[in-house]
Image (spheres, rainbow, N blue to C red):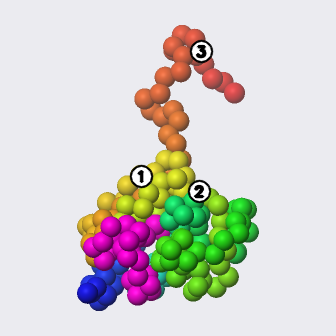
Amino acid sequence: MTDVKRIQADVRAVVDQLMETDSLQPGVFVIGCSTSEIAGERIGTSGSEAIAEVVFSELQNLSERSGVSLAFQCCEHLNRSLVVDRAVMEDQRLTEVSAIPVPAAGGSMASFAYKHMKDPVLVERIEAKGGLDIGDTLIGMHLKRVAVPLRIAQKSIGHAHITAAKTRPPLIGGARAVYVSQEEAGSCDH
């Protein structure tokens, strides 16, 4: 039997701790979520809309508090496409794909999000500024370069391992970078 109250408390703790990091940037925040893993089962084996409902509700709170737009990653049966609001798709100039996620093809979380978002669409890919991976669903393909882990105290939701990330621009150059010798560089007067 799944302890929905515990799962809700876990997600709420994650949301609070993400807010405390002060690292969430306006833009898209991708969510990969295995409700099977949260329930203590192997990914893709026992999805739960009841768990998806709790996770979705608490993550909506994250969106409202931080201003991020949520994107819910589907499972590999839909090539890890993402559920977003149509406004996000249009703003980000994303490519819409023709499918509707269901628990058996897309996963319970993406299916629930699709049914409960204002104007949902499915998009092929995204370059999000951050994300939360619940149950080792591998969201990295949807993060901008360079992903940096967000260290929070909460390490799981239910039985599922979690990893949070933000992104930053690649550090090209910097204080330690050397491109030419000092003699070759000369002075820069312009």
Q: For residue 146, say whether it is visible.
A: yes
* Quadrant location of the N terminus in the rendered image: bottom left
Which tag, 1 or 3, sits closer to the chain's start? 1
Q: Is residue 38 above or below residue 150?
A: below
* Mark 1 residue crowding within 10 angstroms, few (<14) / some (14–19) / many (20+): few
Residue 148: numbered disc: 1
Residue at 57 percent of width and 59 percent of height: 79
x and y percent of residue 81 in the render? 59, 63
Q: Which residue is mark 2?
A: 127
Identified by mark 2, the residue type is Glu
- Residue 69 at least partly seen: no
Residue visible at 44% across and 84% down in the picture: 49
Q: Residue at x 51, y 32 (%)?
A: 173
> The magenta stretch spans which residues?
30-53
Which residue occupies 64% across, 61% down? 124
Disc 1 from disc 3: Cα separation: 36 Å
Magenta span contains residue 103 = no
Residue type, mark 1 in image: Val
Q: Is residue 49 magenta?
A: yes
The quadrant of the rendering that contains the C terminus is: top right
Q: CA distance from mark 3 to mark 2?
A: 40 Å
Numbered disc total: 3
Q: Is residue 99 left or right of residue 131?
A: right
Point out which mark residue 106 bears: none
| Mark closer to the chain start, 1 or 2 | 2
